[in-house]
C-alpha cells in the first residue's frame, strides 16, 4: 500500500536528445517509432492497442503479463504544440485495480543540433511504488535516446 506521503509526487526527467525537435517529435507521433522505445515488456502479450496522436486523441494499451495479469494504460492528449510541447493525462490499471493517474508535460527545446527534453509528471499513486515509476520512466527515455541515435545513423 502506498502511504499518504508517497501518494502524490512530481518528478522531472531531463535528456538531451539527438537531432532537432522535429526529429524528436516523430518518436511520439509515429506509432512504430513510439513502440520502438516505449515498449518495455517484450515478453508480454498485446491484447489491444490504440495510437491517436492529436489534441483530443487517445493512446490505449492492454497487455497480459507472463503471470496472466492484465495491465492497461489509457492516455488522453490534452494539448500538442508541434514540435515544442506535449501535454497529456494518463491512468494505469492492473486488472481492475487503478494504480495511478498522472498529468504530464513534455517540453522540447532546440539546443545546437540536439533537443533538450524536459518531462514533468504530476503523479497520484493509488497502488504501487513511485520510485519504480520514476526509474521506469527514466529507462524509457534512455531507450528513446538510443532509438533516435539509430534513426539518425540510418539517415546519414
Image: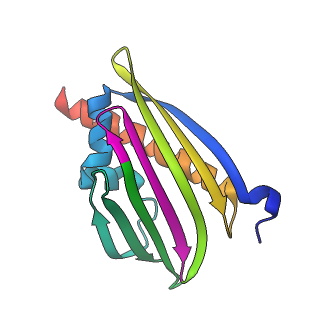
Q: Does residue 76 appear to the left or right of 29 in the view shown?
A: right
What x and y, as percent, mark residue 50? 29, 67
- Main SS, magenta residues: strand
Q: Quadrant of the C terminus?
A: top left
Q: Is 96 situated above or below 111?
A: below
Number of numbered labels in the structure image: 0
**Residue at image coords 30%, 25%:** 20
Q: Quadrant of the N terminus?
A: bottom right
Q: Is 144 situated above or below 62?
A: above
Query: Observer-nearest residue: 79 or 53?
Result: 79
What x and y, as percent, mark residue 40? 45, 59
Q: Does residue 130 appear to the left or right of 56 in the view shown?
A: right
**In the image, is residue 37 part of the stretch drawn in magenta?**
no
Stretch in magenta = 79-95
What x and y, as percent, mark residue 6? 77, 57
Q: Is 39 situated above or below 146?
A: below
**Residue at image coords 54%, 74%:** 93
**Residue at image coords 33%, 56%:** 35
Q: Is 42 situated above or below 10?
A: below
**Residue at image coords 65%, 57%:** 132
What x and y, as percent, mark residue 41? 45, 65
In the picture, residue 24 is in which quadrant?
Answer: top left
> What's the image's color scheme?
rainbow
- Residue placed furthest toward the left: 155
Amino acid at each position: 500500500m502506498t502511504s499518504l506521503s508517497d501518494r502524490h509526487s512530481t518528478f522531472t526527467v531531463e535528456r538531451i536528445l539527438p537531432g532537432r525537435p522535429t526529429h524528436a517529435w516523430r518518436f511520439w507521433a509515429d506509432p512504430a517509432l513510439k513502440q520502438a522505445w516505449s515498449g518495455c515488456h517484450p515478453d508480454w502479450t498485446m491484447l489491444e492497442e490504440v495510437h491517436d496522436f492529436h489534441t483530443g486523441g487517445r493512446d490505449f494499451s492492454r497487455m497480459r503479463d507472463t503471470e496472466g495479469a492484465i495491465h492497461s494504460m489509457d492516455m488522453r492528449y490534452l494539448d500538442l504544440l508541434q514540435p515544442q510541447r506535449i501535454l497529456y493525462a494518463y491512468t494505469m490499471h492492473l486488472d481492475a485495480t487503478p494504480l495511478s493517474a498522472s498529468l504530464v508535460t513534455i517540453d522540447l527545446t532546440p539546443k545546437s543540433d540536439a533537443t533538450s527534453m524536459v518531462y514533468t509528471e504530476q503523479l497520484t499513486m493509488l497502488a504501487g511504488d513511485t520510485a519504480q515509476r520514476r526509474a521506469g520512466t527514466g529507462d524509457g527515455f534512455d531507450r528513446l535516446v538510443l532509438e533516435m541515435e539509430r534513426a539518425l545513423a540510418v539517415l546519414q
